[in-house]
Amino acid sequence: MPGQAEGRQCLNERLGRAFSGKENRKGGIINTIAKLAKTCILRLTVCKLYFILSDKVAHGGASLWCELSQMEGVAAEHNEIYLEFVPENLSRALKTAQSAKVVKIKLTNKHCPCLRVAVELPSLSSSSRIVTHDIPVGVIPRRMWNDFREPSVPDFDVSIYLPVLKTMKSVVERMKNLSNFIVIEANLSGEMNLKIETDLVSVTTHFKDLGNPPWALEDGCQSSAQGRDLESMAEACIDIKKLQQLLAGQQVNPTKALCNIVRKRIVHFILLHEEVSLQYFIPAIA
């Protein structure tokens, strides 16, 4: 394992590259995460940054796994670190970077472990204007790293592309005034329904022609949909507030958005951007 100074230097170099340039998009991702989690884990590796929320699904908690590719990589064995932090603090810091010339982020340990965000702003004079933010972090010991592995997803019954997220958000916001729970159901013919059912009211919104991702099996079969009834609906009832949080938190339109449904167990959302993938897991309610 590299020495402390060498390891910190490599990590700081990657932090600077990961957040310099395209600040608006990166800031949008951080804003999304801030809407979904009060605290989360930041994992820094040679090639990527990961933002992780690992609530206990058994207790109804949602999980988040977000991968952010870096522009370059520096190879060093075991050169990674896990930090716990409040994403809202990083979101606030990056708001000052909207028109920045350069954004530099490094790890510091002056009075406590911190991420120091230094934003160089344009100036009419020859001197630079630099705004600095120190964000407290907690360092996760290596013995606990296995607690923050990428969540495994059981074989899903249906995978489907989502409708336009703004449209879906509008529908869900109206429905949340009627019930605390929403049923998501979809089939392999590109159809998806959002349903609210209470003693007083039953409301269903239908989406058609959404398309189904061409997932391939490891053994090379054409599609995991082979041999299934394409019209059969798979459904899961979930907490509508968790779904509304995900949709309300979107600051950057994803290039692709889809969900996988494991019947009566879990809904797995995947949002893909140019250099970012965000996975969000909402457990079903019995």
Image: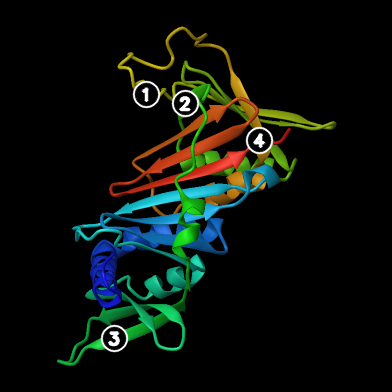
Query: Mark 3 or mark 2, which is nearer the start of the sequence?
Result: 3
Establish if 251 lies above or below 260: below
Q: Amino acid at mark 4?
A: Ala
The residue that disc 2 covers is 159
Toward the viewer: 200 or 286? Answer: 286
- Locate residue 87, reporting x and y percent: 48, 66
Residues at marks 2 and 3, CA–CA distance in whole angstroms: 47 Å
Report which residue position mark 3 lands on. Answer: 130
**Is 38 placed left or right of 239 in the picture?**
left
Residue shown at the point (47%, 73%) measured from the top left: 137
Q: Separation of disc 3 and disc 4 at Cα? A: 47 Å
Q: Image check: 198 left or right of 145?
A: right
Lower position in the chain sequence, tag 1 or tag 4: 1
Cα distance, mark 1 to mark 2? 8 Å
The colour scheme used here is: rainbow
Name which of mark 3 and mark 1 comes first in the sequence. 3
Residue 215 circle label: 1
Q: Are marks 2 and 3 in contact (CB under 8 Å)?
A: no
On screen, 269 above or below 184?
A: below
Residue bearing the label numbered 4 = 284
